[in-house]
Amino acid sequence: MSEANARLDLDERGVEERILAGLDDEQRSVATTLAGPLCVLAGAGTGKTRAITHRIAYGVHTGVYSANHLLAVTFTARAAAEMRARLRDLGVGNVQARTFHAAALRQLQYFWPHAVGGQLPGLLEHKAQTIAEAARRLRLPADRAGIRDLAAEIEWAKVSMLTPETYLAKAADRGEPAGLDRTSVARLFQSYEDVKTDRNLIDFEDVLLVTVGILQEDERVAATVRDQYRHFVVDEYQDVSPLQQRMLDLWLGGRQELCVVGDASQTIYSFTGATPRHLLDFKARYPDAGVVKLVRDYRSTPQVVGLANALLSSRRSAGPAADALWSAPLRLVAQRPSGPEPEFVECSDDEAEAAAVAARIKVLLDGGTEAAAIAVLFRTNGQSEAYEQALAAAGIGYQLRGGERFFARKEVRDAILQLRAASRAAEGEAVGQMVRDVLSNLGYQAEAPKSSGAVRERWESLAALVALGDELVAARGEGFTLAHFVAELQERATAQHAPTVQGVTLASLHSAKGLEWDAVFLVGLSEGLMPISFADTPESVDEERRLLYVGITRARKFLTLSWSTARTPGGRANRRPSRFLDGLRPHSTATASSRMPARKTRKAAAPSTCRVCGKLLSTGAERKVGRCADCPPGYDEAVFEALRQWRLSEAATAGVPAYVVFTDATLMAIAESSARTLEQLAALPGVGPAKLDRYGSAVLEIVARA
């Protein structure tokens, strides 16, 4: 198809022009470029979902696409459900929008009887018990945390298209999950596969692997799929794994009708096998591909956007390997009016930090900001408890993202049952009022109850359903009935696409991807948490920077970044603010309002340099050993290996990952030092008081002996 035919006449009026109305120039370019290949580089808050859904709708309404022959793919069931809802609002509800797994499972269920024969094996939804059984068969230790780490490692291996036989060669730099050496992990990987075979089960990765196998080996099946799907749209393309890319290639079968959307600066799932390489190399793979950059940020104020841009631009070269995976970031241009400056707050300890955040949230609530428009984001789920307690003590409702699912709540299940019953007899009545009438039997009232706890949580669930009904009536128009509303709820329940519930959101930075709030509190921003302590390579530190970038760009207006200097009240104040804040935060005092307690911030430490070549050290691992990755180590290999074997034994005894004892970088620093006393050992980075007390004598003995 020629470019002239692909880019349809923008002077057309009617339904097509109504679809394009309201799009900016770049979004309109995406929506009207209907022939692939097309690469959309879309920064945070730039309206990428709007652009691609309008592209799909425009293509269908103009006859370029057939709704039944287009597949839109994204990475979470929630995102797919949101995309389907937007497409319905644009009059193309029959377009399929699915996750990779959902699309593959649907094809596998259809083609299995013809391509393989018999009944499709059962789907293993959770790996823990099966991995535990595999470990028992090999008499390998595996506690609950270890099983979780091993499950993640097996998932990474499978989406990287590795087998137990090929795992060893490709996992040389993967660390030691559950404290097991790589040979033991490979053996356990094989044992896990054997247990599944014995029980006639497949896991979620197998769904992709088996579907890929069928498409590769059976030309009739491949031809049928390619006849069904002629055009593809892939969202969040920076998160594609090698296995998902292989499936996409087989779906395409050499064709080029592909539109991908992504942002390499939001790659935060590499530990699951995701890689931005496919996005970065798209133009090289498709030389004729069009490239559109979306940089107008409609989500955040200029102050928030400026901080996000500065965070990425302050990154310095970290060596050829890391630089190859770091794309020049899109420089966002804010479209919203000016807002308050981001606040930087230092607190004395974790408890004080949580109390300060709760106090500031109370100020926002009193000022009219809704609780559902506020989020507290942290690096690890273990940090949530302090904020749960602080908010509860302040009488502020909250919801823990990743906790009980909305559609699993009893009041929500009861509401759907009653709404379904009412829909059978409903004729011609206003949907919004009918929803209110039905839910009033379950305790809904227009005003929120004064009490907190279970009564308030129940009301908030029902109020969320009422608000969703009003929202859908406004979007779908007069033809929207109660039966349509019930069908929408059923689909959302399947996809776990929950409506907005009133309550401050507590979430990890990873789970906040794709969401946004008026006010965001980024907490615990100290070295060891941001970047996390086990990020000891340039690539992993870069990913931590991107993770913080994702957190910053979740905020629409209010943004607070905080850290504490000690873990517990009265504890040793040995924490430092995250290196990522160097050059971004004020060097004198925190810019927090007087309502939020804060200490004076310390001068940012000057970046250290390599003691061998003088190069700027950019990672925690390099700073620990005092030299860059390009310079040769200054330690005796025998000393390092002796320390490493000791660490492996300690980790296995304690049932923890090896890095919990000491990271490789700390072991290198120990091996390179001339430490002969506990005082000298305590001066090394990564050797805190607790580890010195627990391991100090043993480490000194090993160094002396080796």
Image (cartoon, grey):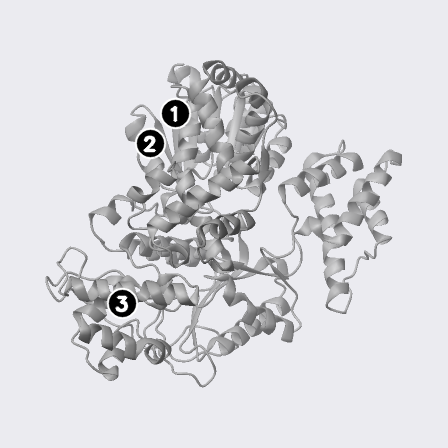
Name the image quarter holding residue 14: top right
| Mark nearer the N terminus (3 vs 1) | 1
* Residue 237, numbered label: none
| Mark nearer the N terminus (3 vs 2) | 2
Q: Quadrant of the N terminus?
A: top left
Q: Is label 2 in contact with label 1 (beta carbons under 8 Å)?
A: yes
Q: Which residue is mark 3?
A: 666
Q: Residue at x 87, y 53 (%)?
A: 441
For the residue labelled by badge 2, is the local secondary structure a helix, a strand or a loop?
Answer: helix
For the residue labelled by badge 3, is the local secondary structure a helix, a strand or a loop?
Answer: helix
Residue placed most toward the observer, 201 or 413: 201
Mark 3 against mark 2, which lies toward the viewer? Answer: 3
Task: Please indicate, yes or no, whether residue 607 appears anywhere in the rendered image.
Answer: no
Residue placed most toward the observer, 276 or 477: 276
At label 2, the amino acid type is Phe
Tell me: 632 left or right of 564: left
Q: Residue at x 45, y 39 (%)?
A: 236
Q: Which residue is mark 1?
A: 37
Q: Residue at x 54, y 30 (%)?
A: 103
Residue placed most toward the observer, 45 or 619: 619
Real-space CA distance between mark 2 and mark 1, rounded to the nearest whole angstrom: 9 Å
- Mark 3 neighbour density, 10 Å: few (under 14) some (14–19) many (20 or more): many
At label 3, the amino acid type is Thr
Residue found at the very far left of the displayed protein: 613
Image vertical order of residue 438 relative to residue 663, above or below? above
Tell me: 179 left or right of 480: left
Residue 434 appears at what percent x and percent y?
A: 84, 44
Q: Which residue is mark 2?
A: 282
Real-space CA distance between mark 3 and mark 2, rounded to the nearest whole angstrom: 39 Å
